[in-house]
Image (spheres, rainbow, N blue to C red):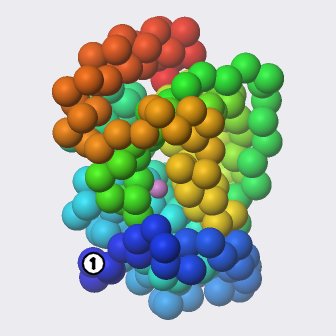
Amino acid sequence: MIHEIAKIGDPVLRQVATEIPLDEITSDRIQVFINDLIDTMHSASGAGIAANQVSVPWRVFVVEVKDNPRYPYKPDIPLTVIINPEIEFLSDDFFLNYEGCLSVPNLRGAVERCTEIRIQGLDRSGSAIDIVARGLTAGTFQHEYDHLQGILFPDRVKDTRTLCTWDEFEKYHESAFRKQAGDIVAKYGS
Ligand code: NI
């Protein structure tokens, strides 16, 4: 089932999401919900989606990047479901990531993201997951983790003059950012 996506201003996006109890992970209720979350991400061409974006404040998000039309410069990420994630910042270096969000329609802005992170949590079968991600891929994981903390990307935009609509991004900022994104991919491998 495709869920409706909550938009900025909806209090559910500002809630800190609740851990999913271990013994519930393999329940039909959670498994069907995870399928719905994946279907909803696909139908909106998202690079990721967190449960509270469909008004269910549980600690789970999914990411997948494969020839994404919204973010053509992003390296591929295989479909990954992460339940009850913990994040660790492995570097003091940051890069500027021009982000957008399904819950923040028609807005993009430059956000500082850590260049290397570690995410630990559980997959949809309840097995441990331990991922180290760098560069743009690290940015994607940080964005989704933020959702579970009730944080949206505009909260992290330091220079509000970088905010723009998608059309204006394409017109005025995309070529410069694509070059930067290429440099980040070259440096960090993702
Ligand atoms: Ni988002």
Residue 139: x %, y % from top left: 56, 36
Q: Nearer the viewer, residue 190 or 109?
A: 109
**Disc 1 C-beta below 8 A from ligand 1:** no
Q: Is residue 159 visible?
A: yes
Q: Secondary structure at mark 1?
A: loop
Q: Label 1: how many residues lie within 10 Å, few (<14), some (14-19) or many (20+)?
A: some
Q: Can you say whether 93 is above or below 59 in the image? A: above
At 32% from the left and 79% from the top, the residue drawn is: 4
Using the rendered view, name the quadrant where residue 88 is placed.
Answer: top right
What residue is shown with label 1?
A: 2
- Count up the numbered dots: 1
Closer to the camera in the image, 44 or 102 = 102
Q: Amino acid at mark 1?
A: Ile
Q: From the viewer's perspective, is 94 left or right of 166?
A: right
Image check: 186 left or right of 4? right
Q: Is residue 142 visible?
A: no
Q: Position of residue 136 (x, y in %)?
A: 50, 29
Residue found at x 20% / y 39%: 167
Q: Position of residue 144 (x, y in %)?
A: 55, 54
Q: Is residue 104 left or right of residue 153?
A: left
Q: Residue at x 24, y 35 (%)?
A: 168
Residue at image position (43%, 14%) is 180
In this view, the residue in front, 161 or 15, is 161
Q: Is residue 1 left or right of residue 126?
A: left
